[in-house]
Amino acid sequence: MDAIIKAIGKTPSLATLPLRVEEGYLPALLTQSGGAMRALGAAMLHRETDRPIFVLCTDETNAGTLAADLEAMLGESVVQLTGRDLALRDIEVVSRQEEQRRLRALDALYAGAGVAVCTVSGLLQRTLPPDILENAAFTLRLGEGEGPEALEPRLLACGYRRSEMVEGPGQFSRRGGILDIFSPGAERPVRAEFWGDEIDSMGFFDTDTQRRAENIESFRVLPACESLVDPSRAGSIAKALLSRAARAERREQTELARRLRRDAELISTGAPLPWSDRYLPELYSEYSTALDFIAPDAIVYIDAPNRCAEKAKDISDSLADDLKILREGAFPVAETGDYLLPWKDACEKIADFAVVMADAFSAGRYPLSPRSVLDTNVRQLPSYGGSAETALADVQRYLENDFRVVVFASDDRRADVLAAMLERNGIPPLRGFPNGALPPEGRATVAVGALSAGLEAPEAHLAVLTDTRSVGVAGDFRTFDYVIALRAVRTSDFMTCEYAPISHKVLGTVSSRIVNEVKGAGRVVFDITGKPPATIEWC
């Protein structure tokens, strides 16, 4: 992918962009930046400037696509930060998955992550200040420690729940000198065995078997929730809530007063408050957002800025409606701006960074007025979607015009099929990127890799064709994985066929096993097309 990034980065329309960033001639606007070019522009800036890149996009779907493209292009992990549902109602058990996912991302940003993708909601949501997160987090190390007795209240103050057996993030258990912790920052829980106050041994363990699987020497423990009550402020917060309760009683708002007094008591005693989000305005002396966690020299790369502005308005309006309903139900919630940074204020904070905007076309009006406009002259191409014939026709057309052609295949087997097909049709391809370079003009190469869409870059005399991938969800995140097609037929002559009916139960079982057990498989389809018109194979 480096060769592709360098080739497009050297085109006349983009070659000056890193210099404009370094000289401060910003904000800059990249037009014709749809499809994979959105990520390519960000990847090029990251590589050429060696500065962190913070990509802002509309929603989780786009975030998943951009993150997948960036990881493919750069070969490094990408932090994803999204929004979450606020815990505002009286609910005893609150899912913290979204919150813990955000904490992992915020911690990675504060630690200096090189590449991050953030949704509009992820950007605008108020959160704990970086110093509170840093002070709440701590590291366990072999030969060191405060002892399990000292760590237990610290974990409780960080939002962890005590459990007899640790099964999920945000839980801990203690059995004598053994302390189990499942931090939001880890895929597996950790077990620390103490000798006195020092950690004698430590390692990850399996939640099913409870057996230790891997020894480690250090482990970072993150807070289990995003709305932490600062112990030094607990008394003043409780006092403020009691004052509000007294005012509510004078207005005969009995239910509101009851909730405020109850919550004041819980906060003053340090007890966990599942609905602590409602008091976010009181928790910290200053508000923070994701922008407070990124490095000062980071480049903020805004994808489709006008659509981001529209998304911000939708998010704000939706929350305002929810808060209005809660207030009518006597829930002590604040105003919209206390939970979400207004988009106008967000743009003012973004303007403190180096800003590059990318859009499919110039709309003439943007949240930040561009000082320079660069037309990338890169056109998005559709995936060849498993059709070797389509790929062949496109390759031939580009080679006739002296383009360098890169055909990405999903895996080695698929690459072999495509390479053999090109060879049979008089197009002997290269494989991969010999010496890290693109093929010469008029030549094609077949490589293993994937992007969300192909692209055509006339200035670079380059065309990139891609295989089919599908947006899905895995765990907490959007994924961008491959489609698996099931083909079952009945035939008597092997020249014609009809599909073989398979029960929905069997198909459901097969589909479930494939997407859960096959890496890279994000969707399963069952082909019911007969032959003719469809062939047996999908290539």
Image (cartoon, rainbow, N blue to C red):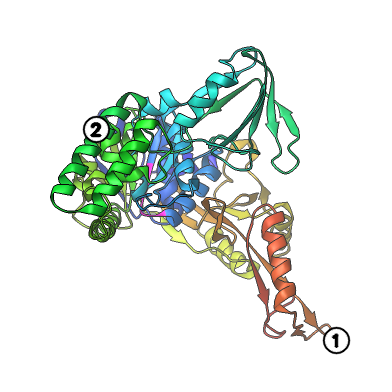
Evaluate whether residue 342 shows in this view: no
Considering only vertical position in the picture, is 221 above or below 53? above
Which sits in the foreground, 345 or 461? 345
CB atoms of marks 2 and 1 within 8 Å: no
Evaluate whether residue 331 shows in this view: yes
| Residue highlighted by disc 1 | 493
User: Where residue 400 appears, x then y in whole percent?
Assistant: 54, 61
Mark found first going from the N terminus, 2 or 1:
2
Q: Residues within 10 Å of mark 2 (few under 14, many from 20)?
A: some
| Residue highlighted by disc 2 | 239
Q: Quadrant of residue 217?
A: top right
User: Where residue 144 appears, x then y in whole percent?
Assistant: 60, 13
Kind of residue indicated by mark 2: Lys
The residue segment tinted magenta is 55-59
The residue lying at 26 percent from left, 39 percent from top is 281
Q: How far is the residue under mark 2 from the one under mark 1?
A: 84 Å
- Dot 2 falls on a residue whose secondary structure is helix
Which sits in the foreground, 249 or 439? 249
Considering only vertical position in the picture, is 469 above or below 134? below
Name the outermost residue toward the left: 251
The residue lying at 40 percent from left, 36 percent from top is 53
Q: Quadrant of residue 497?
A: bottom right
Q: Quadrant of the C terminus?
A: bottom right
Q: Is residue 229 left or right of residue 150?
A: left
Q: Is residue 56 magenta?
A: yes
- Dot 1 falls on a residue whose secondary structure is loop
Kind of residue indicated by mark 1: Asp
Which sits in the foreground, 535 or 85? 85
Q: Is residue 123 magenta?
A: no
Label 2 vs label 1, nearer the camera: 2
The residue lying at 42 percent from left, 52 percent from top is 91
User: Where residue 223 appears, x then y in whole percent?
Assistant: 47, 32
